[in-house]
Amino acid sequence: MSLLIPTHNDYVDAHGALDEEQEFYRQFELVKDHKDEQGNYKYPWSFEVVEGFFKQADDNTDDAKFNYAVEDFGRLKSWSEIKQDLQKLNENAASNEQYKLIFFARHGQGYHNVIVEKYGIEEWHKHRRFQTTDGELTYAPDASLTPVGIKQAKENNEAWKRELSLGAPVPSKFFVSPLQRSSQTLVLTWNDLKPESLKPLITPLIRETMGESLCDKRSPVAVIKERFSKYGFVIPEDMPEDDIDFRNDLRETMPEQTFRVHSFLQGLFDEDIDSDNKVDKESAHANTFISTTSHAGTIRCFIVALKHRHFTISTGGMIPICIKGTRRVD
């Protein structure tokens, strides 16, 4: 039986806070034309979802019940067709356009998720998120996977094995949140499936919502290195030893976090730009398929930034999204 089943809290995470979502769109309209001191746009890329590849982009798919792991990842075509179609789209794209398929994976069940289910979301927001233990379970800081979370990641490993045998691509780049539950999930999902030469990059921009909830405070860099360097994880040289971005008295808002993941997308698509500010076709083709492993709040913000339909992601869940990026040329 699959463990990748959405809960009511997962559904609320995916569909709530509509006022914050609209606030992001309002704020983005005010700054989307801003330029830096060199005259470059701060947000040169605009994004749109390309439909027709996956059921998750279809409004008729019931996201509260859908389980990608037992439905071929939700694909509407064979992997051969998906790869050929995306290759053609990139080949025929204008010099300021490119297409990517990003697999947005959520970490498996962490001990903080157990606390939410145990006491309820209201008790979590009032008290439990400011604590590290309930006397039985330690769930903060930097919550780790539970035995169920480990099994969810292993279920994903088996699902990927099936899809790879059917022609699914191995992503060319792996990005992962610095929080250990996401890194543990990536290891258990991918370590025996991807080439050792593909080094996962720990990426602060895709960490969970920052502040107040102690489960979302990351470990020191030395601890992260001890845990994950043996798996080839690369830690940014400028990442501070301690989590100076986390504040006990202030929670990051959805608009703030969405700007953060928007910056990640801007940088990701910019990696395929040549010295003439045009898309390098070879680079775009080589980097069509991307993996991120992060969190429910982070994926919700990606969905907002991309204007994808709301979609419930279970702990350990994943959503593939085909994206067209268009870069300003003026």
Image: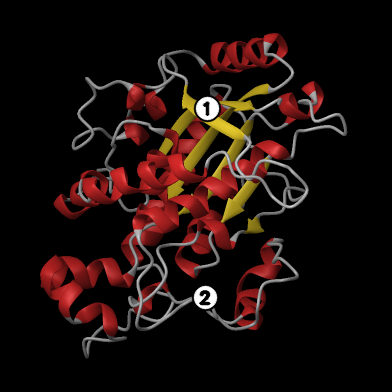
Residue 323 badge = 1
Residue position marked by numbered label 2 in the rendering: 245
Callout 2, which amino acid?
A: Asp
Q: Residue furthest bottom?
A: 135
Q: Does residue 295 appear anywhere in the picture?
A: no
Q: Does residue 64 appear anywhere in the picture?
A: yes
| Residue for point 42% across, 14% down | 52
Say above or below: 328 vs 207.
above
| Residue for point 24% across, 43% down | 1
How many marks overall? 2
| Residue for point 72% across, 27% down | 284
Q: Quadrant of residue 99?
A: top right
Describe residue 155's horizontal placement relative to residue 32 as left or right.
Answer: left
Q: Quadrant of residue 291?
A: top right
Q: Residues within 10 Å of mark 1 (few under 14, many from 20)?
A: some
Callout 1, which amino acid?
A: Ile
Picture coordinates of residue 10, whole percent (x, y): 23, 51
Label 2 sits on a secondary structure element that is loop
Say above or below: 233 vs 237.
above
| Residue for point 18% across, 73% down | 124
Q: CA distance from mark 2 to mark 1?
A: 30 Å
